[in-house]
Amino acid sequence: MAIKCLMFVIFFAVIVRSIDYNEQPYDQDDEVDLDDEYEHESVIYWPSSSPSMTPVDAAEVCDFQKWRKFVNCSERNLTAVPYNIPPETETLYLGFNLLYRLRNDSFANLTQLRELYVDSSELTDVESLAFDGLCDLEVLDLSGNSLSSLPDNLFVTNTKLTELNLGHNRFDTIPCKTLLPLKRLSKLLLFLNNINLPYCERFPNLTNGSIVSLSRNNILVMRQVNFQFLENSTLSSLFLGGNNIVLVDYRAVIFLKVQALDMSYNPLSEVGIASLFYGMRKNDMLRSIELRASLMNSKDPTNFIFLKNKTIDYFGASANEFTSIPPWTILLNGVRNMSLADNSIYHIGTTAFREMTALEEVNLENNQILELQSLTHNTRWNVTRLHTLKLAKNRLDNIPANVFLGLENLTSLDLHSNPITYLNIKALNGLHRLEKLDLSQTKVGSILHGTFQFVPNIRSLNFRNADLRLALPGNFLTDLRYLESIDLSGNSIQSGDLWNDYYQVSMFSQNTHLREIRLDDNPKIINIPEKTFENLTSLLFLSFNGCGLQSIKANLFTDLINLTSLSFDMNSISDLPTNLLWNLKHLETFSAAGNSLTSLGSAIFKNTISLRYITLPNNAITFIAGDSMSHLSELRTLDLQGNPLACTCALEPFSDWLKVTNASLIGERRTLCSPASFEDVVGERIADFEPASYCGPNIALIISLPSLLIVIIVCMGLSVHYRYWIRYRLFMLKLSLFGYRLYKARDADDYEYHTNVMFAADDQPWVDDYLKPVIGDHFPEKDLHTDMVFGDEDLIPGMYYLDAVHYSVVHSYKTVLLLSNASIRDEWFTTKFRLALEHVNETQVEKVIIVFLEHIEDKDLPFLVRVFLSKNKPYLRWTDDEAGREYFKEQLLKSLEVNMLCDNTIPV
């Protein structure tokens, strides 16, 4: 014992001597510019030519939500702040435009603004009075621009500002004088700048519990003097990740009044680690630390001795390339929550955390754990306080019996995204307090009756995309009488699994406490028996989107008297029974998008007086009764985009209501009068339709078409009907006459991946159901999991998100981008698109294919997509027509086999 104490004293003395930074002169070599990757990440850079700065009318380009006092003018290619923004606006989005400068009069009339977002808008200058008069401003986002400084008196009148985002700009110092008036500031974000000395002589006192982010700057050494500006501030979190910090002054750590410190992605040296932990031990307030990818240089476990007996709420050690449970965990006996995710740990023993007596939660997601061993009373787990265990994204293919013995206090078990094919009937033995079980993204197939007998207290059960093929009604969930939430989406559940006619029992008969049911994406559910939800009076949320329903029975929801959210999008329902919703007096959200509804009767929402959100886009609705929604005083949003509404006299009552309601029409600019409308208003916005101009008592509509017009229409109809056959023949003729312009410098086998597919999360079903089988059949020699990249799930784990996206683009023979209404609203997808086009410019090879999954109005296309198409770049269009699909398939597969030379440059 004496020898250990002596070694500890000597070790500590070496550390203190080596990190006495405050007595050393500042070395200018510490000033290192940020890598180019930081400068370009996650921002869309528009063409550099300076456009006209003339403002436009907000009514023509922006979306409004009156009940929220919300205006969205993002991604409109604006060169100036629009005029005619309602003065009562409280939230304004102006991101992803070409503003370049905010002028003194940009927001002159918007004195009620509370939240302002001007991110990624090419700002280089903000005039000193730009925010003058915005006395109620609380949130301001100026991130993703090119600002290097701000006027000293910019925020003089914005004393209520609590959140300020200046991330991803070009600041090389903290704008201290500018921030001085902000006495209520609680969140300051300065990530992704060029700051190497975070120093201020004067700085506002931040409110207690504030958040400060200086991640991904150029701070190489953590010195006390550099954080002196925070001496009077008590922070909840300080983010210093991604700064390439090697050395740490322990006095800087002791000095900070912070509860959580993020030091991720810093190549800390052995001395730096020891100094950091010593400072943490001496700082009673600091009780959480994130060290993701920062412990790779740690070879000496004695560095962790400073944390022994220290109460630590969270200790993050993810992505540090560990292959086993680190030996230093025996010293962390005061840690309550520990993360070892994203490593390469392949084995976990029941004694791995035996000395961590305070451990309550452990995260082992995304490792290489191959198996869990069956236990006995003598080999059981001995972490008795553990209540949360995360084993998701490992390589477990079965769960044997008795693997969790000893975890009697466990309440949450996460096993999602493992290749589990078998769940032993006694796999959950010993988990009698378990409340949450996640088996989503597995391959369990079926569940044996009695599997849940050991976990009667489960409240939440997730089987999303678990390959369930059969769930016997009356048996499957019998033991889970306290179940409150179940997700059965993305499986092969059939209508007969929901209700057993022979026993007259529902799958949910014993689960009367259910509050949430998800049955989405089960295409074999072609009807839902009338008594499926009988006695579920506590149910609040119900969804069965993407099933095969063609109709709904009138009394299906009779017992769901407390339901607040109902969704059955993407089915084939053509009609809703008049009394379908009459018992749902507490319903707040109703969604039936993507069905085949043709009209809404006057009584459909008769008793749903609490409705706030109605979502009905992409149906076939031509008529809406005028009094169907007039009594819905709580209604806030209505979405009717993509419906062929006929602007005729029959629509007059609804049109009149639309003009006086406080509800906002979502996608107002895309809710248009169909060709069945009066000729003068076809293509006009529904909101602008004036029935009084057409619907007098003596108005008669006379339609006469000359014979020639009829012939033309018939010819056009035939051309449209056989368009895909014609296009396919022309396509094959072109190939036979001209062939390809092949790019032979590199063969497809020279690339790590053959095909890289990028898409929005909403388009995952199309990729799984159509694209993967087509590509797999055509390229049988390719492995869909190793030779292809399908979305974010196949990106290389452990890399920065954009780095992983860029890697998949550069190392793929072909990149396919799936465009849909969901993807163009996704800012990350726009960034991916820009990365792909930059790579085309660099290689001068047409390696990118655009696929339109649905119709998108030209005016809704992002700027970069329009630029791409203007260069006659290749694109394909998906269609519901069978012949069209065959043409689409042939054209796609041909395009995936060759790369053509590119003879121009795309301005990105």
Image (spheres, rainbow, N blue to C red):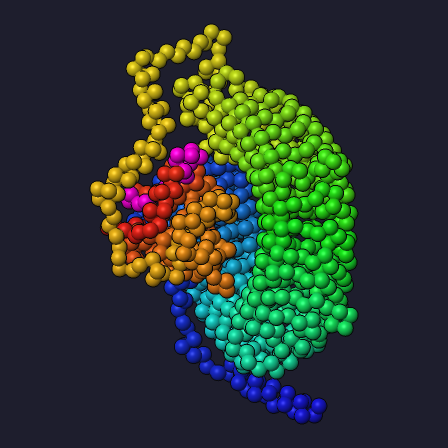
From this viewpoint, is residue 502 visible? yes
Viewer-nearest residue: 367 or 39: 367
Q: Which residues are magenta?
A: 871-885
In the image, is residue 872 part of the stretch drawn in magenta?
yes
Residue appearing at x 40%, y 66% in the figure:
35
Q: Is residue 409 above or below residue 707?
A: below
Residue 481 picture location, percent across and down: 78, 47
Viewer-nearest residue: 255 or 68: 68
Residue appearing at x 37%, y 45% in the figure:
892
In which quadrant will I find the N terminus? Answer: bottom right
Quadrant of residue 600 in the image?
top right
Quadrant of residue 755 in the image?
bottom left
In the image, is residue 541 part of the stretch drawn in magenta?
no
Viewer-nearest residue: 609 or 181: 609
Q: Residue furthest top?
A: 698
Residue 277 picture location, percent across and down: 61, 77
Answer with left or right where residue 135 lies relative to residue 881.
right
Answer with left or right where residue 759 lies relative to residue 586.
left
Viewer-nearest residue: 58 or 655: 655
Residue 235 picture location, percent across and down: 61, 64
Residue appearing at x 36%, y 47% in the figure:
893
Residue appearing at x 31%, y 48% in the figure:
50
From this viewpoint, is residue 659 visible? no
Q: Is residue 418 above or below residue 57?
A: below
Residue 56 picture location, percent across and down: 39, 37
Q: How many discs appear?
A: 0
